[in-house]
Amino acid sequence: MAQDELDLPRMLARVERGIAARLAAALKTAGSTVEEWRVISLLADGAGHTMTEIAEFALLPAPTLTKVIDRLVSAGLVFRRVDEADRRRVLAFLSEHGRETADRLTAAIETEWRGVQDAVGQEELALLRVLLTRMSARLA
């Protein structure tokens, strides 16, 4: 296997870390973390989600997600409710304060993302999205 092929995982990690660092800095200024943002952004759809769904979306192991949800509940951003369709499940929702926070965090993320687009280029990002989507589907 060629060295260039072996270097691809490192390059992917480097790009991910670079983007994550920029987003983390923007979110920190807005008073949040990347993990909290991922949870809040999913819950912003208003549908209510199980912990399993949230963990998969937020790319978090269950124990870490529980801590994140507990912090968000303590901050009054999220609340839990028993699922009416299946009383064994608990769903998480954004509170009104959580929705306001989601709007504020979305604005911070969008501003930072425009900086990423300016640095990398929209066409390159669109191509990267297509390629990563294909790779993700094939590796799943």
Image: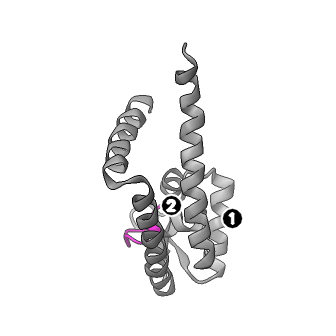
| In this view, the mark in front (2 or 1) | 1
Horizontal side of 120 relative to 123 (left or right) equals right
Q: Which residue lies furthest to the top in this view?
A: 1
Query: Where is residue 73 drawn, in percent x and y?
Result: 61, 77
Q: Residue at x 52, y 53 (%)?
A: 52
Type of the residue with mark 1 = Lys
SS at badge 2: loop
**Is most of the magenta stretch helix, strand or loop?**
loop
Q: Image height check: is 47 above or below 137?
A: below
Range shown magenta: 41-50
As for residue 100 lying within the magenta part, the answer is no
Q: Image height check: is 81 above or below 13?
A: below
SS at badge 1: helix
Q: Image height check: is 88 above or below 139?
A: below
Horizontal side of 24 relative to 43 (left or right) equals right
**Residue 12 visible, this orientation:** yes
Q: Residue at x 55, y 13 (%)?
A: 1
Of callouts 2 and 1, the N-terminal one: 1
Query: Where is residue 47 drawn, in percent x and y?
Result: 37, 68
Q: Which residue is drawn at 40% across and 61% down?
A: 118
Type of the residue with mark 2 = Arg
- Res 89 label: 2
- Res 67 label: 1
Query: Where is residue 29 drawn, in percent x and y?
Result: 61, 77
Query: Where is residue 113 drawn, in percent x and y?
Result: 44, 64
